[in-house]
Amino acid sequence: MREFKIAEPRTAEEVAALLAETTEAAALIAGGTDLLDELKSGVSKAELVIDLRGVTGLAGIAPEKAGLRIGAMTRVVELAENAAVAQGFPSLREAALSLATPQLRNIGTVGGNLCQRPRCWYYRDPQVVCRKKGGFQCYAFQGRNKYHALFGGSGCFIVYPSDLAPALISLGAMATLGTAKGDKTIPLESFYALPDVDVSRETVLAKGQFLKSVWVPPPPAGGKAAYVKIKERGTWDFALVSAAVAGVVKDGALAGVSIVMGGVAPVPWRLKKAEDVLRGRPVTEALVRRAADAALEDASPLKENGYKAELVFAALKQAVLAIV
Amino acid sequence: MRGKAYTSYARASAAAQARPADRKPGPAAESPAGEAKARDFGIMGRPTGRVDGREIVTGRAVFTHDLKLRGMLIGKILRSPRAAAEVVSIDLAPALALPGVAAALKLAEGRVRYAGQQVAAVAAVDERTAEKALALIKVEYKTLPAVVDWEKARDPNAPQVRDGRPNVDKLNEYVRGDVEKGFADADVVIERTYRTGFEVHNPTETHGSVALWEGDHLVVYDSTQAVHGVRDGLARALKVPAANVTVIKNYMGGGFGSKLSLGEYTVAAARLARETGRPVKILLSRRDNAVCVGYRPSSCQTYKVGAKKDGTLTALALQNIASGGIVPGDDVAEPAVDLYRCPNCKVEEHTVFTNVGPQRAMRAPGHTPGMFGLEGVLDELAAALDMDPLELRRKNYSTKNLGDTGVPYSSKGLDKCYELGAKAIGWDRRNRRPGEGNGSGTLRRGIGMASSLWSGAGVPGTLADIVLYPDGSVEAVCGTQDIGCGTRTHMAVVAAETLGLDPKDITVKLGNSDYPWAPISGGSLTTPSVAPAVRDAALKAVERLKAVAAARLKVEPGDVVMADRKFAAKGDPSRSATFAEVCRDLRRETVFHGERDGLPAGYAYNTFGAHFAEVEVDVETGRVRVLKYAAVQDSGRIVNRLTAESQVVGGITQGLSAGLFEERVLDDTTGNVVNPNLRDYKIATSFDIPAIDIQFAEPDDPRINNLGSKGLGEPARVPASAAIANAVFNAVGVHVEEIPMTPPRVLAALKKKETGS
C-alpha cells in the first residue's frame, strides 16, 4: 500500500478548508470499503486522506420541509432500515437494500455510494493508464466491454455503479455541497458529469468542495416510485441495468414521470425520451416498449454490451408495472 | 525446530480431540479379508462431525498463511506486464540497496510468454519493504508480438507462442468402429457445438509457502495438495536429496487442482531462504491466483451423433479444440468414448497455444467440460427423437467401458442414480417437450439432468500407519493431505470403526512428507487410497491386540470379541480387558503398517452419479435461477455421510457457479486478465444456491478395495453445469450451448430460437 498522510478534521468547514488548501492529491474517506482497495492496488494516488468520521453533523436522516435530509455519512444500512424512508420513499429503500451485501451496507455510507469511483476493470487495473487516469485511450472501447456504457460514452465508457443515485435523482433529490465559501445546493442530477466535461472525474465537485448531504423532497400526492435492479447473481453484484421510476399515477397513466437508469452510462442516465412517450398515456406493455425504443435511439452499443438494450426494456417494464 | 513446529500442532490437535465421546464406539469388523459384503458398520456411512471442526471455526487452526516464524522474511515476486517479450536485462541492484531488503533473485531468462510470468523476486523484512523493492527492480523488455485469443492463435500467420512450432497441436485421437457407416445407419443425425470458458480455481486460501533451512535440511510449509510431490519437485529443482526435504501442510483452504504440483513461488522462497539463512514466506495475491496458477482450459466441442428412431445410438463423433495457454488444454473425450453404448465412435482433439499463463487441472479436468457437451447433445438428440432424455440414456446404458465394448465396470450404480434422482426432482413435472408451457409472465420453468462419470479408484501402494501406545492412545498416520474435504475425520472414522473406538479417540497425523507415502489429494483419490490403507493397518492392529488379549484372558485369539473399548472372551463377557489394558500389555509403542491393495485386473473402476436441476429462466432479462436440485452419487461405500454431503454441496455450488457466472476475461491486446478479483470474477453466493437433495446409491464395489469405497470430490462436480444447462433447454426450448450461461448468452440463444437461425 502507498504511504499517505491522514487528516482528521472535526467540522465541515475544516474539511472544505483542507480540500481547498492542500497541494497534494486528496481523497475523502467515509466507510472506506472502496478507497482502501484503491489505495492498496495503487489505483488511487491519494497523498492526503481526509477522514470524515470525526466530522460533526454529516450523519443521520432527519425530516426537513416535509422531505428528508440524509447526511453523507449516514450508513447505507440506516437508510435501508429507516422507518420514514420505508414509509415515504420505498424505491430508495429498495435501492439501499439491493446494494452490495449486509457487511458492506453496515460500513458503506450514502455519500460514499454517491461519490464512488467507477468499477471499470481497465480503470481498476493498476497496470493500465486509461484516459480517466491521464492516458490517451479508453481500453474498453475496443476491448472487453460487457459491463460498459450503452449511452453517453465519449472517450470513456464507464458506467456509474451507484444504486442510490438513480433512485434519488428520480425522486428529485437535491445535493448540498460543502465549500470553503459555505454550502451550495444543486439538483443531484447535475452533480454528475459526463466524461466529455472532465474525463478524470464523475462529478462536478470543484476543488474545495465535497458532498455534505442530500435532500429528498416530499412525494407528490398520488406519487409512486420503484427501483428495479437487474444483476447477474443473487447478491453482491452491481447492476447490469437498473431502473428508478417515479411518477404520479392517474387512471392507469403516468402523469409526472421521471426515469433514471443505472449501469448504462457514465452517469445516472435520465431517459427523457422514454418519459415523453409514457407521460399521460395509458400504460401498456406496448407503450413501455415504445418508450424504451425511444430512449434507445441514443444508445451506441459496443461489441459486447448490446444485450443491455434488452435489459433497458426489461428493467423499465418491471419498474413501470410495479407502480401502475 | 522442524519436529517441534509439527509437534506443537499435533498437541493442539490432540487436545482438541480429547473430549468426552458422544457416540457409542462402533463394533469392530471381525475378518480382515474378503469382507466387502454385509458389513454392519457402526460409524462408517453415518454423519460424523469433523474432528478438527472446532479448531477451524474458532480460528485456532494454523494455515500456511498464518505462519509467523522467528526472523521470517517476506518474499514478493515481480511479474511480467508483457504477454510476450525478450528479457534483455534485469537490474536487482537498486532493490538490494534498499534498507530492509535481504536478497533478490532473477527468475526469468530469455523469453517471457505470458503477462504475469515471474521475472524476479525479493525477500525483505516486511511486506511494504518487499513491495517497494519490487518497484525498484529495473527490467528491460523487448516486446514481441503476442496472441492471446485462442481463435486468433489458430491463424497460421498468428505470432508463434512456442519457438518455431505451430500454435495448433494434436491433443487426442480415438477411433472405434466406423462412424460413417454408423451415421448412414441412423434415422436421425444432429450436429451441435458446445463451448466452455476459462474457470479459475480461486481457493479461499491463495497459494503460498514458507521455507526455512535447518543446516542442509529444507523444511517447507506449503499450501499444497501434494506434500510428497512438492518434496520431490523441490529436491530436483534445488539439486538436494529428497531425504533432506520435508514438506508440511497442516491446514488448507482449498486447492481444486491448482495446488497439485510444485509452485515456482515455492522454489523462489526456498532459494531466498537459502541465500539469507532465514525463513522466507511468499504468499500469492488474489490477482496472482487468476494470472499465474492455472485455470480450467477452454473447450469448443462439436458433436455429431446418429441414432435409430428408438434412440439406439449408431455413431458418435467429437471434434474438440482446447486452449490452455502456454501448455496444452484438456482432452474432454472420455465421457463420449466411455459412457453410452455405441459401436462407432471417433474423436479428434486439438489444442491451441496462446500467450496466456499455463492451465492447471481443475476439479474433474476434461470430464466436466466433456460432460457438458455430451449430455447437452444427448438432450438435443432426445428432443429431435421426441423422446424422454432419461429413456434415451437408459436405452444406451452400458455395463462395460468404452461404450460397452471394453471391460466390465467393477460396479456401476448409475441406473439406480437415475431412478432415485428422477423421483427426488419430480421428473414427471418437466416439460414434455423443451420450451413447451410451464411458466408465467416472463418466467419459464424447466427440469434437466446429466450423468457423472469419473475414475476415482484410488492408488494402490498408499501407505498408512496405526500406532498404539501403552497408555491406550492411538495414532493414525499418513502422508496424505486434508485440503478441507475432511480427510482427518475419515482417517479417524476408519481407525475407530476398526478398533472399536470413537473417532475422537484417534489422533490423526497427516500433511507431512516424512509420513508414509500417499498420493496427491486430487483426482478423487484420497478416500479410496487412504481409507483402505488405514483400514489395513487397523485390522493388523486388531489382530495383534486380540492375540495379546487372548493371552491375558487365557483364551484362543479366535475366541476374543472386541466391542465398546473392551476385549472379552466369546460367550463370557465377565472375562474382559479394556482396550487400554491390552495396549499396556504391548509394553511399548507399536506401529502397524497398512497398505492399499492393488486393483484386480479385468475390470474398469469408475464412479457415477446423476444430477437433476429445476430452473426458472426470465426470458426478458436472460437471468437463470436454479430452484431445486437433486443429486445422487455412486461412490461406493460412504465413509462419512456428513463430509460426503459437504463434498456434493460444494461440487454443485461450483458447477452452478461455473454454469451461470464464472468466467475469466482476457484483454486481447495486453494479455491481462481484466477480472482478477472476486468482484468481477463472479462466484455464486448463498442467494444463488437452491435446496439440494443428496442421496448416495451405495452399491458396495466388491473388489475396488477393502472398504468398497470410491472417490467423490470430482464426481459431484462433473454433471452440475450440464444438468442446469439441460434444465434451461427444457425451460426455453433452446440450448444455450455455452457456459457460463450469462444473461447476454441466454438472450442471444432466445433470439436465435426466435429467428430460427
Image: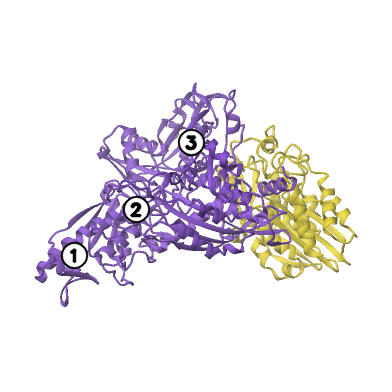
Question: What residue is shown with label 1?
Answer: B471
Q: Earlier in the sequence, mark 1 or mark 2?
A: 1
- Name the secondary structure under disc 1: loop
Callout 2 environment at 10 Å: few (<14), some (14 to 19), or many (20+)?
many
Q: At 46% from the left edge and 26% from the top edge, which residue is drawn?
A: B91
Residue B103 is situated, as x and y percent measured from the top left of the image, at 39, 34
The subunit letter for the residue under badge 3 reads B
Left or right of B523, for residue B596: left
Residue A243 is situated, as x and y percent measured from the top left of the image, at 75, 55
Does residue A58 show up?
no
Q: Earlier in the sequence, mark 3 or mark 2?
A: 3
Kindly identify the amino acid type of the residue bearing the numbered disc 2.
Pro
Q: At 48% from the left edge and 45% from the top edge, which residue is drawn?
A: B335
Check the rendered structure and report the hue given to chain B.
Answer: purple
Above or below, comparing residue B188 to residue B728 in the picture: above
Check the rendered structure and report the hue given to chain A.
Answer: yellow
Which label lies toward us, 3 or 2?
A: 2
Quick check: marks 3 and 1 in contact, CB under 8 Å?
A: no
Question: What residue is shown with label 2?
Answer: B528
Which label lies toward us, 3 or 1?
A: 3
Kindly identify the amino acid type of the residue bearing the numbered disc 3.
Pro
Which label lies toward us, 1 or 2?
A: 2
Q: Quadrant of residue A258?
A: bottom right
* Residue nearest the observer in this picture, B202 or B616: B616
Residue B278 is situated, as x and y percent measured from the top left of the image, at 33, 40
Callouts 3 and 2 in the same chain: yes
Does residue A278 show up?
yes
The quarter in which the C terminus of chain B is drawn is top right
Q: CA distance from mark 1 to mark 2?
A: 31 Å
Question: What residue is shown with label 3?
Answer: B358
- Name the secondary structure under disc 3: loop
* Residue nearest the observer in this picture, A319 or B347: B347
